[in-house]
Image (cartoon, helix red, strand yellow):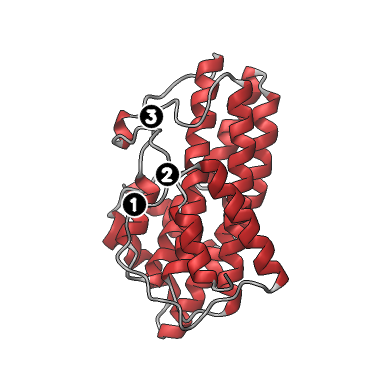
Amino acid sequence: MTDLHLTAKACLDASDPAEKLRLTHAAWAAVQSGELRPDPSSPLPGPVGTPGRPARPRLVNARQVPQRGLGTAEGRAALVHAVAHIEFNAINLSWDAVYRFRDMPDGYYRDWASCAHDEARHFALLSARLAELGHAYGDFDAHNGLWEMAEKTAHHDTARMALVPRVLEARGLDVTPGMIERLRHAGDERTIAVLEVILREEVAHVAAGTRWYRWCCERDGIDPFETFFGLLRDYLGVSLRGPFNRPARLEAGFVEDELDRLAALAVAG
């Protein structure tokens, strides 16, 4: 197969995590070699559906996911599982961005195929750490918030680029330093080492979202600053939580005015 869109769909549909990772790494290698390219004649995507995922974890409302302390191995395993679930969703989100949105520059597809490859590697690192802690992916309940936003933005590439990488995934830039600090108090250097890799590499993923969000705005002749906050209001209301990791977000392409306004909204909310 040489059609990147159909390959992305195959990665998206794979339900077994090991198979999803295998297909993802193979697809990225084929993109790098030039074997896989977006095909303008590829069948257009249908309505967004449920991505391929295993029967477990059980998906519950975000408020039903228990908060556990990090003083026990069980609590640390629950944290690692929560991050692994985010990374598994991020693989699907990256491939859906490749599969769903057409007539984009080649660089767009390359960026999101690269992100899928990174997210798959992150999931593997977290799965290995979970195994060291006596658990596996699926052992704890999880929520479906990331994919629900994919469903809400399936019709609108600008909204997808604004709200998934620049809001939901960027939240990881904000909260991971605090996780690392708490784990340091718990003496869990092995989990810290994994999270530090993920934090460093997620900056580039949020930057890709920023880059292609602004490209969409330029294409459509709309102001990226006001559009971003309009999309936040329309899709998320005022339910923003701070604080924000300003250095990481600036590195990921946010500007000071955006961060000032986000901080003000978080306080007001």
Local crowd size for mark 3, using a 10 Å CA cut-off: few (<14), some (14–19), many (≥20): many
Q: Do the residues labelled 1 and 2 touch (CB within 8 Å)?
A: yes
Q: Distance between the residues labelled 2 and 3?
A: 14 Å
Q: Which amino acid does label 3 sit on?
A: Asp
Q: Which amino acid does label 1 sit on?
A: Thr
| Mark 3, residue position | 141
Q: Are marks 1 and 3 in contact (CB under 8 Å)?
A: no
**What numbered label is drawn on residue 187?**
none
Local crowd size for mark 2, using a 10 Å CA cut-off: few (<14), some (14–19), many (≥20): some
Above or below 55: residue 239: below
Q: Which amino acid does label 2 sit on?
A: Arg
| Mark 2, residue position | 53
Q: Is residue 251 visible?
A: no
Q: How far apart are marks 1 and 2 (CA)?
A: 8 Å
Q: Is mark 3 on a helix, strand or loop?
A: loop
Q: In which quarter of the image is residue 55?
A: top left
Local crowd size for mark 1, using a 10 Å CA cut-off: few (<14), some (14–19), many (≥20): few
Q: How far apart are marks 1 and 3 (CA)?
A: 18 Å
Number of numbered callouts drawn: 3
Q: Nearer the viewer, mark 1 or mark 3?
A: 1
Horizontal and vertical percent position of residue 23? 58, 54
Residue at 51% x, 77% y is 215
Disc on the earlier residue, 1 or 3: 1
Q: Nearer the viewer, residue 98 or 70?
A: 98
Q: Nearer the viewer, residue 127 or 159?
A: 127
Disc on the earlier residue, 2 or 3: 2
Residue at 70% x, 34% y is 193
**What numbered label is drawn on residue 50?**
1
Q: Nearer the viewer, residue 225 or 263?
A: 225
